Image: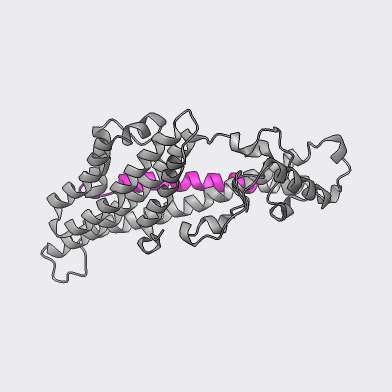
Amino acid sequence: MKIYGLSGPSGKYFCLWCLVTRETSNQPPNKRPPVEMRTLRTLKEDHERFMRSGGKITDAKEYHNCVRRPMFNIPLERVALPTLHVSLGLFHKFFKMLHKACQVLDIEMFMLLAKEDDIDEPVLLSERYNEYVTIIKDIVALEETISVMTSQADNLQNQIENIMLSNDTDDDEEEEDNENQPTLYQFTQMEKEKQKLLEECNEKTDTIREMRAKLPHEAGFTVRGLELALSSINVHLQAYHSQAFVGNHVNKCCKSQNQTILCDSVVQTTERVCPELLPKAREIVALYQPLFTHFSTCHNIYSLSRELSTEEVVTLGMLEYVSVHVHHPECMTI
């Protein structure tokens, strides 16, 4: 992305191949307006307009975030996707979605089990169940905060890189107005703010680790069942990058029999612990099994070392519809 002159993934126009905006990309696919495709020529033209206007990084979005000249004259249709990182990111996202659905199911499960205890007022949960529910809700809130803060830190890092790169210009760009360039003080402040965000993220991550250790022994039935299912196929969450996966583990999870093991663990655990919630457990599996299956198909397609057919490209496009369906079934009209 940056070798073609774009400001970075946090920019308004972040895509190398088209002019989709960040706001538009968050809409369901069938509700997005048509977008214009980028070409090597439009990248150069947008950069020239950006420089003629003064080359202020803060105005990058007005020129489709083309803040530098492309380093190569290779047409965009010849640029390959970083498929390994695509798979790592997508599978981690989908697994976290399933994990969160299991956390919600576990909270409901403990509330039901608490009501079955000999408690005079069912509304008041027993101490062990209430402790679990409180800790899980706090963990989920912290994870969402960390996600936002990490995004802010990434955005600051992109701004810092843009400042450094904009100071390393060609001879014909040296006459750029110095007043448009950020001062050393601004640069230092952004770096300090970024480091502070990262430190707070690390602190909150440590807090989550401590909170998980305090969970009651019997807490998190379906979550623990899901993690045991991962272990049974020799897949382990990493202790870094928000418990991400490595490439080989993603390949293992793309096998249909292993996906069945993961999804079945939710139903099997619920049936053993709290049969009353079996319908909800089956709803979760009905949503995520097709998602993982379609992801596996896409993973195998874009990992090929050849040009894709039209049919394969259409299959890749369907992954977004399937993933949107998990959160917004009403948007699944094509």
What colour-coding does the image apply? one colour
Which residue: 25% across, 60% down? Answer: 130
User: How far across and how far down the image is residue 73, in percent?
Assistant: 70, 33
Q: Nearer the viewer, residue 92 or 198?
A: 92
For this view, does 178 lie left or right of residue 262? Answer: right
**Farthest front residue?**
310
Which residue: 48% across, 50% down? Answer: 147
**Farthest left residue?**
118
For this view, does 323 lie left or right of residue 17? Answer: left
Q: Which residues are magenta?
A: 191-220
On-image quarter of the C terminus: bottom left
**Farthest right residue?**
175
Observer able to see residue 121: yes
User: How far across and how far down the image is residue 174, in percent?
Assistant: 87, 40
Which residue: 44% across, 30% down? Answer: 304
Q: How many marks?
A: 0
User: How far across and how far down the image is residue 104, in percent?
Assistant: 29, 57
User: How far across and how far down the image is residue 102, in percent?
Assistant: 28, 52
